[in-house]
Image (tube, rainbow, N blue to C red):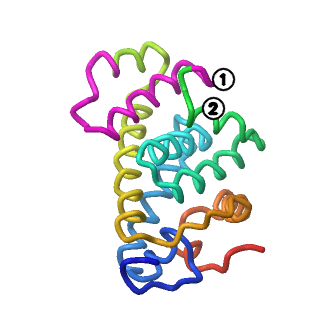
Amino acid sequence: MAHIEVDPNLPGIRSLMAFRPETAEPMSALAEILLRSDDGLSRGDRELIATYVSYLNDCFYCHHSHGEIAVCYLNGNRSLVDDVRNDYTTADISDKLKALLNIAGKVQKSGKAVTEHDVAKARESGATDRDIHDTVLIAAAFCMFNRYVDGLAAKTPTDLSSYPLRAKQVAENGYGSHIYLQKQPA
């Protein structure tokens, strides 16, 4: 049960967004910009970064939600998403994404944990300044989103079969606040 009175029919961050629409709007806009941009990183890579940081933060709702959205962008490759969660260094992803996930993992601990060496390695692997920027901002934003969901004890569905339906909806329609208020797809 959530720490505050929210709509029990809306799981996770959706109930919190419905509770406070005026904060939902800029948070949704930030998610839309960071996760659905087609500049630089792919949408799949962006969702993998969000999934990985959420996994490190032990935010069940977010790492399953964004993991499923990544699956949508990765042509159904759920095992790749699981590989990134479990040990991205051995996952079948580019060296560039591995270097960026290293940076994201350090941001999850502390922004100051990111070193010049980490950034240089990402650049050597083909990352642009924008890729590095977006990785750091995705990681930082997801620390906030994860703490928002877990700090208010938002309802977290444990039935994993509900996550792919919502993921498809987000992948098709984006992160606008309209998504948070729509009924869960059946």
Q: Which residue was labeled with disc 2?
A: 83
Secondary structure category for the residue under label 2: helix
Q: Position of residue 47 (x, y in %)?
A: 56, 45
User: Magenta includes 143?
Assistant: no
Residue in the image at 66% along x and 57% along y: 171
**Residue at the spot x=38%, y=30% of the render?**
103
Q: Report the side of 18 relative to 36 (left or right).
A: left
Q: Amino acid at mark 2?
A: Asp
Disc 1 or disc 2, which is closer to the eye?
2
Residue 104 shown in magenta: yes
Local crowd size for mark 1, using a 10 Å CA cut-off: few (<14), some (14–19), many (≥20): few
Q: Are marks 1 and 2 in contact (CB under 8 Å)?
A: yes
| Disc marking residue 146 | none
Highlighted magenta segment, given as a residue range: 90-118
Residue toward you, 63 or 178: 63
Would you call the spot at circle 2 few (<14 residues within 10 Å), some (14-19), or many (20 or more)? some
**Location of residue 31 in the rendering, given as x and y in whole percent from the top left corner:** 47, 57
